[in-house]
């Protein structure tokens, strides 16, 4: 297929904007970039980008599909006053309420959301304690059928007893093996957070993971994670994870809001990835991670949505504004830092976990994961000022088409792999049951 008449944003290391460009796509890959390629390859079908911006699909470095049914749900009793209460009153009873159908529809509705928001690769962190065995297959099958790319994991925790922890370990090990031979699927070894993991469980996870895989774990999202770790082990969270062999160049720690400087240095020294989710941090009122310091230390920081809708530019904008107001200094969190995290670091992380394709860049040989953006700048737009044009001008509503591996998942705003009306109606039909089960589990954790 030839994509003609696009304005390409390549996101190569030296970013280029190429006007009036054509892309030749074959076997899911970008084969050639040039002008008038439809004349050179007259036998190829063509799609007219009509002057829209064409760029790599967005990547989300951390999310939770399992949270989908929280939308519009009431929390019984007093409103949670802090993050530990949010876990106990909202997320833990909700993940407990998910059966196979609940997991399937959570993933389906968020797959629709991702495609419409131009997010083509997602790192999911899953929990459904009453449906562990096979839960990652349900998620993986939905993503594959939808045409997306995903990196899955199951969050091991001791909060539901030793059987739950053992089943979680098994599910991770199984999916790491399975995903290794499936195109568009990868897997990490999920851990909930230090505060729900016992020493022996961390050791069992280290033993089970095998060589070449990495962990995906929440770290220091709230102060309680640090104090719990000190109480359990005499060590702060990152030190504790290091002692158990959890850190490393394939491991992802999420948030890092309350880690201290020594912990940040340990992340940098071990090459561990960190993901930033500012909308979630603001919503949970947990604080602001020292992201600029982390970047200066050389920590590979990516950006995720943490279960918010998968609008990556909205997450970028939140990061851009949050760090300015937090420091009372409009010079903080330069847009280039946002691009470093949201584009380059997220792409490097995706390429680590999904090595079969080159993601996050438009160049010959890279995956044809593309989004089409109907944006008409009324001031000069260059590779130099693009990050600011994006933060102040780009909106997900301008995304008209989404493609993965050369296949349109949404074409001119029409979803081609998923029936939104039908899926939303079916999700609505099971939602009351999920909410009822959720309410029956509230109060289980005190
Ligand atoms: Zn999370």
Image: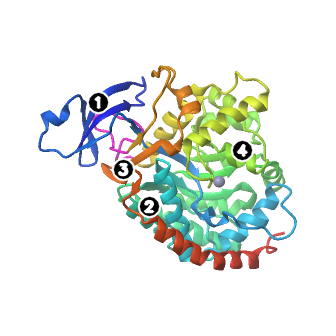
Cβ(mark 4) to ligand 1 < 8 Å? no
82 or 397: nearer the viewer: 397
Q: Are marks 2 and 1 in contact (CB under 8 Å)?
A: no
**Label 4 residue SS:** helix
Q: CA distance from mark 1 to mark 3?
A: 19 Å
The answer to whether any part of residue 219 appears in the image is: yes
User: Is residue 135 in the magenta section?
Assistant: no
The answer to whether any part of residue 213 appears in the image is: no
Task: Say left or right for 298 vs 399.
Answer: right
The residue at which mark 1 appears reads as 21
Mark toward the viewer: 1 or 3: 1
The residue at which mark 4 appears reads as 239
The correct choice, above or below, for 22 with respect to 306 in the image is: above
The residue at which mark 3 appears reads as 404
Q: Residues within 10 Å of mark 3 (few under 14, many from 20)?
A: many
**Label 1 residue SS:** strand
Q: Residue 319: percent from the left, percent from the top?
A: 66, 36
Quadrant where the C terminus is found in the figure: bottom right
**Label 3 residue SS:** strand
* Magenta region: 355-369
């Amino acid at each position: 297929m030839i994509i003609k008449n696009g304005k390409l944003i390549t996101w190569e290391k030296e970013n280029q904007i190429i006007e009036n460009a054509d892309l030749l796509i074959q076997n899911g890959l970008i084969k050639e970039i040039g002008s008038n390629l439809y004349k050179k390859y007259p036998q190829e079908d063509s799609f007219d980008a009509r002057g829209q911006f064409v760029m790599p699909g967005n990547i989300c470095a951390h999310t939770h599909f399992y949270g989908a049914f929280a939308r519009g749900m009431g929390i019984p009793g007093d409103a949670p006053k802090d993050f530990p209460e949010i876990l106990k009153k909202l997320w833990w009873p909700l993940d407990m309420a998910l059966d196979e159908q609940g997991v399937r529809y959570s993933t389906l509705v968020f797959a629709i959301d991702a495609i419409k928001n131009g997010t083509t690769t997602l790192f999911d962190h899953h929990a459904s304690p009453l449906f562990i065995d096979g839960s990652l297959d349900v998620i993986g099958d939905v993503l594959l059928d939808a045409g997306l790319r995903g990196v899955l994991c199951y969050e091991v925790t001791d909060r539901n007893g030793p059987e739950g922890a053992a089943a979680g370990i098994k599910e991770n090990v199984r999916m790491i093996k399975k995903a290794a031979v499936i195109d568009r699927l990868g897997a990490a070894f999920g851990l909930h957070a230090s505060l729900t993991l016992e020493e022996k469980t961390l050791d069992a996870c280290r033993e089970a993971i095998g060589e070449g895989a990495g962990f995906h774990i929440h770290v220091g999202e709230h102060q309680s994670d640090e104090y719990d770790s000190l109480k359990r082990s005499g060590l702060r969270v990152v030190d504790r994870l290091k002692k158990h062999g959890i850190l490393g160049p394939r491991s992802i720690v999420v948030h890092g809001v309350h880690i201290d400087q020594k912990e940040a240095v340990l992340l940098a020294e071990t090459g561990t990835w960190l993901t930033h989710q500012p909308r979630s941090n603001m919503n949970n009122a947990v604080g602001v991670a020292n992201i600029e310091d982390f970047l200066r230390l050389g920590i590979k920081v990516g950006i995720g949505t943490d279960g918010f809708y998968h609008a990556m530019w909205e997450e970028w904008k939140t990061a851009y504004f949050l760090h300015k107001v937090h420091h009372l200094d409009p010079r903080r969190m330069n847009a280039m830092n946002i691009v470093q995290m949201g584009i380059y670091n997220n792409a490097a992380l995706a390429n680590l976990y999904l090595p079969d394709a080159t993601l996050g860049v438009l160049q010959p040989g890279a995956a044809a994961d593309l989004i089409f953006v109907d944006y008409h700048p009324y001031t000069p737009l260059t590779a130099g000022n693009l990050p600011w044009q994006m933060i102040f001008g780009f909106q997900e509503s301008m995304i008209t088409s989404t493609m993965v591996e050369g296949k349109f998942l949404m074409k001119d705003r029409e979803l081609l792999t998923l029936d939104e009306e039908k899926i939303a109606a079916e999700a609505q039909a099971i939602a009351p049951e999920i909410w009822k089960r959720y309410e029956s589990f509230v109060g289980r954790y005190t």
